Amino acid sequence: MVIHSQSELETFQIAENLLANNNIFALSGPLGAGKTRFAKGIAQALDINPDQIISPTYVLETEYSIPNQNIKLIHIDAYRMESADELIRLGIENRIKHKDIIVIEWADKFREQISALSTQCSVVWVKMGYGKNENEREIELV
């Protein structure tokens, strides 16, 4: 299924609509395609200020408290990761057990390992791409 977003607001709304019952959002796509914008949409749906969400490329992981809940939003950027061991060392399995919401940018680098986690939680694969117009994005659910 491919969804066309014409704006950042639409991308936020698409992310919010996908939030129900999903623990991991595995994002892929080229630089500037909207992966971090999608993460901001998830944050906004969880009552986290989306302006706080930045790509965690250099820190690999950032966690955000979700207001009035005992779970967190975990934002991971796998761009600089060299192996799936780095993802595991971040404690992703414990985060899943805790029912945290996890957004992983550049998840396609570790497709096999992330797919294996689907026995423990719900994983949604989201492929971000450019649309025909400057602000348009194609969001493919795979």
Image (cartoon, rainbow, N blue to C red):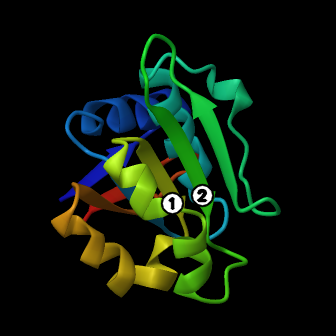
Q: Which residue is mark 1?
A: 104
Q: Quadrant of the C terminus?
A: bottom left
Horizontal side of residue 2 vs 64, given as left or right: left
Q: Position of residue 73 (x, y in %)?
A: 51, 37
Give the residue drawn at x 62%, y 26%.
50
The tag on residue 76 is 2
Q: Position of residue 2 (x, y in %)?
A: 25, 58
Amino acid, disc 1: Ile
Horizontal side of residue 96 vs 78, given as left or right: left
Amino acid, disc 2: Ile
Q: Position of residue 99 (x, y in %)?
A: 33, 41
Q: Are marks 2 and 1 in contact (CB under 8 Å)?
A: yes
Count of all numbered marks drawn on residues in the image: 2
Q: Which element type, helix, strand or loop, lies under badge 2?
A: strand
Give the residue drawn at x 50%, y 16%.
47
Q: Quadrant of the N terminus?
A: bottom left
Q: Nearer the viewer, residue 28 or 46?
A: 46
Gap between marks 2 and 1, in whole Å? 5 Å
Whether residue 72 is visible here, answered yes or no, is: yes
- Disc 1: CA contacts within 10 A as few (<14), some (14-19) or many (>=20): many
